Image: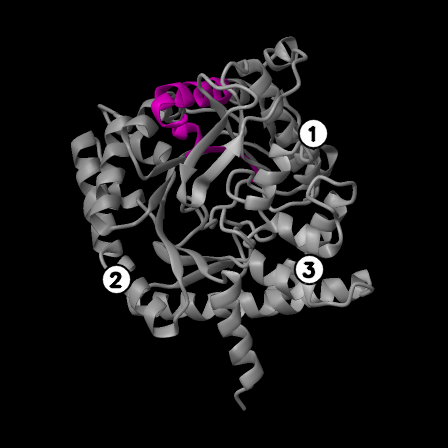
């Protein structure tokens, strides 16, 4: 029997509380695009993307209209490009990036991810060439996103790659200084990267993935906040967690419905649904707002990490009951620039860098969309990355750093991109030196619990 109350609740979620499908991401293997000649590789890539993604935007828009559920982003994630280019006799990774960008533009998607490499134990020639090309590739393209996996719980932390990537992040920021260093906003480094993540900038088609699949990322911080606010002020933590689980179940059910319908229209397999609560700069669509509804004065207050841990866990427990194919990151994002409440907390000084790092031990990803002074040294950035990689490695979870050393800007300034990328104040970082430590290089060994076969 159809429950009218559930129908009305879902309508209110969409109209009043910003419920949406944040992204539908077509994961596409490019392994059969490998060739000896770079021009042939680019031709193969372009043809394959246009073949599989030609109807993605049209069909997604049709479903959004049919079900009256906004689908905000349509994206593509491809095989890590370091694998695709290194077999060429004349490799040119910037040329591949331009090919990806042009194909993405022609099929109408917002972003294309997969300008990526997996280097947690070391780099091949192709990995090194791709990494060196990242700043130019991101400066010359609009839709291409890049990710590099630097560490894992099994392999440890590749500190040579950490140091290299700190310099690449700085260079990416510098080459896009005329647009608030947006190149760094399209670049993320990971520990324990998942191969089925639908969210940018970290999306790519993992090596264990099928030829093609559709992965879905849902949203709904505003829905969760409204549900928590409706509870009595004296509701205990168990009641709070159960309400979040209930809402997460409904959000996930909606996302899975749309994902399976779209996959069927495209005649490709449905992959996973990522349960992550992805905020936006829109008023009321904030993870930080959920903390306030829980009873904290603002994000950053003592208790914020505990509130985030409970939120993350309850979202996963509720969502897993609604779908047998949960993947990606799944939990709650805390991107500073993309969350109105986080922006406010950072501007008022409630949320400092060290508190954000502590929160990453229990959140869905890590240090995300944080702007820092442009003159921050690459060694300091390497130290920031190493700390975050260590949290992921020890806790067997995905962690990431997407940090923006805003060229020419300092504390008191801000960056502004508009749209989902939002804006962020420049946050101060610890000025103590990390140089000798990070320049030792080598690999931080994996923890003892990596030997669990």
Q: Quadrant of residue 95?
A: top left
Q: Nearer the viewer, mark 2 or mark 1?
A: 1
Residue at position x 70%, y 44% from top? 298
Q: Which secondary structure type mostly characterizes the magenta part of the structure?
A: helix
Q: Quadrant of the C terminus?
A: top right
Range of magenta residues: 164-192
**Is 400 in front, or is 67?**
67
Q: Is residue 143 above or below residue 64?
A: above
Disc marking residue 58: 2
Report which quarter residue 225 is drawn in. bottom right
- What secondary structure is marked by label 1? helix
Residue to which mark 1 is pinned: 354
The answer to whether the residue labelled 2 contacts the one labelled 1, judged by CB atoms less than 8 Å apart, is no
Say few, some or many: other residues with alpha carbon within 10 Å of mark 2 (under 14 / 14 to 19 / 20 or more): some
Mark 3 and mark 1 residues within 8 Å of each other at the beta carbon: no
First in sequence: mark 3 or mark 1? 3
- Does residue 153 appear in this view? no
Asked which colour scheme the image uses, the reply is one colour
Please provide percent x and percent y for residue 448.
74, 34
Report the mark closest to the observer, 3 or 1.
Answer: 1
Residue at the bottom extreme, as displayed: 1
Distance between the alpha carbons at the discs numbered 3 and 1: 25 Å
Question: Which comes sooner in the sequence, label 2 or label 1?
Answer: 2
Cα distance in 3D space between marks 2 and 1: 44 Å
Q: Which residue is mark 3?
A: 314
Query: Mark 2 and mark 3: span between their CA atoms?
Result: 34 Å
């Amino acid at each position: 029997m159809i429950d009218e109350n559930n129908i009305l609740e879902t309508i209110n979620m969409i109209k009043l509380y910003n419920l949406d499908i944040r992204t539908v991401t077509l994961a596409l293997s490019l392994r059969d695009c490998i060739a000896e000649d770079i021009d042939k590789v680019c031709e193969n890539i372009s043809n394959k993307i246009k073949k599989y993604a030609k109807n993605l935007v049209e069909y997604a828009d049709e479903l959004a209209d049919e079900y009256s559920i906004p689908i905000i982003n349509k994206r593509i994630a491809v095989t890590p490009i370091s694998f695709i280019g290194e077999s060429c006799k004349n490799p040119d990774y910037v040329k591949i990036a331009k090919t990806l960008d042009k194909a993405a533009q022609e099929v109408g998607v917002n972003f294309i991810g997969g300008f990526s490499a997996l280097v947690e134990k070391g780099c091949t020639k192709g990995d090194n060439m791709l990494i060196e090309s990242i700043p130019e590739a991101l400066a010359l393209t609009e839709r291409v996103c890049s990710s590099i996996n630097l560490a894992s719980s099994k392999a440890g932390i590749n500190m040579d790659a950490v140091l290299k990537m700190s310099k690449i992040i700085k260079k990416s920021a510098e080459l896009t200084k005329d647009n608030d260093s947006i190149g760094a906003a399209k670049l993320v480094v990971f520990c324990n990267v998942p191969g089925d993540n639908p969210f940018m900038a970290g999306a790519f088609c993992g090596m264990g993935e099928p030829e093609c699949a559709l992965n879905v990322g849902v949203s709904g911080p505003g829905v969760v906040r409204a549900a928590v606010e409706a509870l009595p002020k004296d509701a205990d933590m168990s009641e709070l967690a159960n309400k979040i689980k209930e809402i997460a179940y409904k959000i996930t059910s909606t996302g899975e419905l749309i994902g399976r319908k779209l996959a069927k229209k495209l005649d490709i397999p449905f992959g996973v649904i990522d349960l992550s609560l992805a905020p936006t700069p829109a008023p009321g669509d904030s993870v930080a707002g959920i903390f306030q509804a829980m009873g904290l004065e603002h994000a950053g207050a003592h208790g914020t990490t505990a509130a985030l841990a409970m939120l993350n866990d309850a979202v996963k427990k509720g969502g897993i009951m609604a779908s047998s194919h949960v993947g990606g990151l799944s939990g709650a994002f805390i991107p500073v620039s993309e969350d109105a409440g986080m922006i406010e907390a950072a501007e008022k000084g409630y949320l400092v860098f060290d508190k954000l790092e502590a929160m990453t031990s229990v959140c869905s990803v890590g240090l995300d969309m944080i702007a820092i002074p442009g003159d921050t040294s690459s060694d300091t950035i390497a130290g920031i990355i190493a700390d975050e990689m260590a949290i992921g490695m020890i806790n067997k979870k995905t962690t990431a750093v997407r940090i923006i050393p805003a060229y020419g800007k300092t504390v008191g300034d801000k960056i502004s991109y508009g749209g989902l990328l939002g804006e962020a104040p420049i946050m101060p970082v610890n000025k103590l030196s990390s140089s000798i430590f990070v320049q030792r290089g080598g690999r931080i060994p994996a923890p003892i619990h990596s030997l669990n076969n």
